[in-house]
């Protein structure tokens, strides 16, 4: 369901396109605006008690916002995956290196300078790769990454667990999310 509509009423502008192109553009714009609004709202979401959402919900809400635009089942938070993510994030705490754990799960990693980066901002960065993914060719645009996005929206993935650490020596923030079952199988479409 789309919560936005766009109308162009300019006598100076006439856009000519096929109905299928118009529908595709409208769906893309609508889902992009919806994701943006959901991500912004979850970035600074506050509960009724005035406390910030749990770390799990700060990661989970934007993941599920992205999945809902494609009508995919929401992910469930998995404490086992979160423990694995915390274990690996602790390994990166001293160097903040963008290296994958090469573990048994799907994995997205994020690094940001400074220490103010939020889980929602990391997930937003991964979801923003959607613009580089071409469903028809099932590939990323030349020279671009889109695997973080496709892992988030992988149809068969059901569980996620994530962690955030501030790296020592002012090296920044490292975040990781692990997914089970993993996605990004070569030759398969994510959804």
Image (tube, helix red, strand yellow):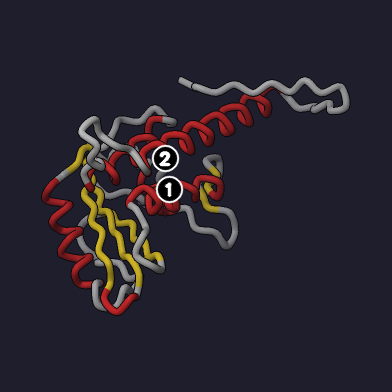
Residue at screen point 29% across, 46% down: 59
Q: Which of the numbered marks, if any, corresponds to residue 124?
A: 1
Whole-Å distance between the Cαs marked 1 and 2? Answer: 7 Å
Q: Earlier in the sequence, mark 1 or mark 2?
A: 2
Image quadrant where residue 67 sits: top left
Quadrant of the drawing holding the N terminus: top left
Q: Callout 1: 10 Å neighbours few (<14), some, many (20+)?
A: many
Q: Callout 2: 10 Å neighbours few (<14), some, many (20+)?
A: many
Q: Is residue 127 above or below residue 87?
A: above
User: Which of 136/140 is in front?
Assistant: 140
Q: Which of the numbered marks, if any, corresponds to residue 32?
A: none
Extreme-front residue of the structure: 50
Quadrant of the drawing holding the C terminus: top left
Extreme-right residue of the structure: 12
Q: Position of residue 175 (x, y in %)?
A: 30, 60
Q: Position of residue 84 (x, y in %)?
A: 15, 58
Q: Is residue 187 visible?
A: no
Left or right: where 74 falls relative to 5: left
User: Which of 43/35 is in front?
Assistant: 43
Residue at screen point 30% across, 30% down: 73
Q: Are marks 1 and 2 in contact (CB under 8 Å)?
A: yes
Residue at screen point 32% across, 71% down: 99
Q: Is residue 158 above or below residue 88?
A: above
User: Which of 17/122 is in front?
Assistant: 122
Q: Is residue 124 visible?
A: yes
Q: Position of residue 96 (x, y in %)?
A: 31, 73
Image quadrant where residue 53 sits: top left
Q: Is residue 46 above or below residue 108?
A: above
Provide the secondary structure element on which disc 2 rests: helix
Which residue, given by chain and number where applicable, does mark 2 sit on?
39
Residue at screen point 49% across, 58% down: 145
């Amino acid at each position: 369901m789309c919560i936005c509509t766009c109308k162009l009423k300019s006598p100076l502008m006439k856009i000519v396109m096929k109905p299928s192109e118009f529908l595709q553009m409208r769906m893309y714009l609508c889902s992009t605006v919806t994701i943006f609004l959901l991500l912004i709202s979850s970035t600074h979401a506050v509960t009724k008690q005035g406390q910030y959402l749990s770390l799990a919900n700060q990661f989970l809400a934007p993941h599920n916002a992205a999945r809902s635009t494609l009508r995919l089942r929401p992910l469930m938070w998995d404490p086992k995956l979160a423990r694995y993510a915390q274990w690996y994030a602790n390994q990166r705490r001293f160097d903040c290196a963008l290296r994958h754990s090469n573990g048994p799960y799907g994995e997205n990693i994020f690094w940001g300078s400074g220490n103010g980066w939020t889980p929602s901002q990391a997930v937003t960065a991964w979801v923003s790769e959607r613009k580089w993914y071409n469903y028809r060719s099932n590939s990323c645009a030349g020279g671009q990454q889109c695997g973080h996005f496709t892992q988030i929206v992988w149809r068969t993935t059901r569980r996620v667990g994530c962690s955030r650490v501030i790296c020592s020596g002012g090296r920044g923030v490292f975040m990781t999310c692990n997914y089970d079952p993993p996605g990004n199988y070569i030759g398969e479409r994510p959804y």
